[in-house]
Amino acid sequence: MDKAAILALADRVEALTGPCFNIEDQIEKVARLPWRFPPPNYTASLDAAMTLVPGTTIAASFDWPPGIEGATCGAVLTLVTLEGTRDVKAVSCTPAAAITAAALRAIAGGEDAN
């Protein structure tokens, strides 16, 4: 796993102004997920975005709005694992994209965004 590439992709998802097929395809490659064509609509579908939540997560919750100043769509992904609990925050153009960005940060082990 290339942590820097995954975090850079999370930044790109946060910068989106609408759903993006090209980024969805890159998510599958960078996160080393099983390739599917077409890839799931991670930036448009809540169900697809939720599939990115790391498998080591025992529980996850989301909050809209997440209390991130200036955010129109955001997600706070609360990861509960055997090691403890941590929040990963992200904002984007849609709730699904925000969840996708937060999940990518969680996959990479990145710290809170914003």
Image (spheres, rainbow, N blue to C red):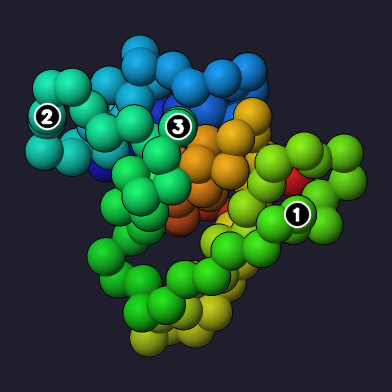
For disc 3, the marked residue is: 43
Contact, mark 1 vs mark 2 (Cβ under 8 Å): no
The quarter of the rendered structure image containing the N terminus is top left
Callout 1: SS: loop
| Nearer-the-camera pick, 51 or 26 | 51
Image coordinates of residue 11 in percent, x first then y, are 57, 29
State the separation of the CA atoms marked 3 and 2.
15 Å
Q: Residues within 10 Å of mark 3 (few under 14, many from 20)?
A: many
The structure residue drawn at horizontal position 70% and vertical position 57%, both measured from the top left corner, is 64
Q: Residues within 10 Å of mark 1 (few under 14, many from 20)?
A: some
Is any part of residue 59 visible from this angle?
Answer: yes
Q: Looking at the picture, does residue 1 appear above or below residue 65?
A: above
For disc 1, the marked residue is: 65
Q: Earlier in the sequence, mark 1 or mark 2?
A: 2
Is residue 31 rendered to the left or right of residue 92? left
Contact, mark 3 vs mark 2 (Cβ under 8 Å): no
The structure residue drawn at horizontal position 36% and vertical position 72%, both measured from the top left corner, is 57
Callout 3: SS: loop
Which amino acid lies under the numbered mark 1 shown in the image of this protein?
Pro
The structure residue drawn at horizontal position 13% and vertical position 22%, both measured from the top left corner, is 37
For disc 2, the marked residue is: 36
Image coordinates of residue 87 in percent, x first then y, are 61, 66
Which amino acid lies under the numbered mark 3 shown in the image of this protein?
Thr
Image coordinates of residue 2 in percent, x first then y, are 32, 36
Which amino acid lies under the numbered mark 2 shown in the image of this protein?
Arg
The quarter of the rendered structure image containing the C terminus is top right
* Number of disc labels: 3
